[in-house]
Amino acid sequence: MDLELTDEQGLLAESVQQLLARSSGPAAWPALVDFGVLALASDADGEVGAVELALIARAVGERLEAVPLIDTAAALYATRGLPDAFAGAVSLALLEPGGGWGLEPLSTSLAIAGLEGSKFALGAGAADSLLVLADDGGGRRLAIVDASAPGVAIAPAQGIDPSVEPSLVTLSGVAPGTVLDRAEVVLARLLAVGSVMAAAEAAGAAAAVLELARTYAGERKQFGRTIGSFQALRHLLADMYVKQDSAWSTVLFAAAALDDGTGEALQTASIAKAYVSRAAREVAQDALQVFGGIAFTAEHPAHRFLRRILARGQQFGDARHHERAIGRALVGQAIPV
């Protein structure tokens, strides 16, 4: 497994960074679509993989853009090889209110009368399609639904980061457009690549807030000296750098494992999600200490980075959920059943 970025991957990362520097806010998602992000995510030839998607997600996290990249790209990546079923932005309606990160219990049903149930999703209000996890009586199924279809009601929900638009989706007799084959295989790929991309965006946000803190420590003066010259802050910033850099390395390793199709790819994705969820959060929290009181004001961006990191840390399962999944996998390997 080659963990060094190729020239093409480096150029892709640089191009996306420049693109988002020119097109931010509401213009960011149309610019990414014009750039070809949807085509990259659905690349059936496999020339573009999870590493490239992680690079794009990191650039989004660095600039805190509120775009439906993760849900859309994860859905397209997980359904590669299947007939084209998605058009435009996708919102993943997998979780249920009051349910667990393991997607159980599953009360949303798929019957002749259509889809019935409630789902928690991100960005559903601006999505073109919903990918809904439901039980058809014989097992779990993934159904694609037009977000504007009759019987679909989308309402804002509370969340730590309003910019990712948490939503409550209510389904009442909704006829699915497509029900995907091999639902469990697609779901496993979806959760793995989604976890890696969410971790990549959090790592990008951590890198950006670390740079803000480093710059501030080199400019802010106390007692006639820049605060970055104080030993306590030097050590704090050094620890932040190690956490941020190791978080990004973990993401790249997990993405490369997915692309290589290794047997431990799903477990590696869980390791990345668990580690980055904690490490990125600690970087952002330490940055608040560097900034001092100004970081707690609404005008300062530090709290926005922390909010995004917390939101992505919860998406596709929090650190504890993935740590338990890793533990169960290791026990299963050590003790044959």
Image: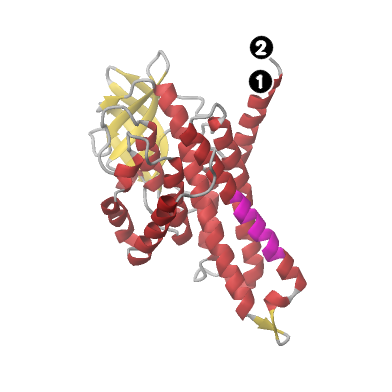
Displayed quadrant of residue 335: top right
Question: Percent x, y for residue 103?
Answer: 50, 29
What's the mark number on residue 332?
Answer: 1
Q: Position of residue 221 (x, y in %)?
A: 66, 83
Density class for disc 1 (Cα within 10 Å; few <14, some 14-19, many ≥20) is few
* Residue at horizontal 27 percent and vertical 42 percent from the top: 128
Image x and y of residue 80, in percent: 34, 31
Q: Is the N terminus in the top left, top right, bottom left or bottom right quadrant?
A: top right
Q: Residue at x 74, y 75 (%)?
A: 230
Magenta segment main secondary structure = helix
First along the sequence among labels 1 and 2: 1
In depth, the one of 80 and 75 nearer the eye is 80
Could you tell me the amino acid type at mark 1? Gly
Nearer the observer, 298 or 142: 142
Residue stretch rendered in magenta on the structure: 236-247
Image quadrant holding the C terminus, namely top right
Whether the magenta-drawn stretch holds residue 243 is answered as yes
**Residue 114 showing in the rendered view:** yes
Q: CA distance from mark 1 to mark 2?
A: 7 Å
Let me know if residue 316 appears in the view: no
Would residue 240 be counted in the magenta stretch?
yes
Q: Quadrant of residue 287?
A: bottom right
Vertical relation: 49 (above or below) 65: above
As rendered, which of 67 and 4 lies closer to the eye?
Answer: 4
In this view, the residue in front, 46 or 215, is: 46
Placement of 165 over or under 286, stated as above or below: above
Task: State the residue at coordinates (33%, 34%).
Answer: 45
Q: Which mark is residue 239?
A: none
**Which disc, if any, is residue 337?**
2
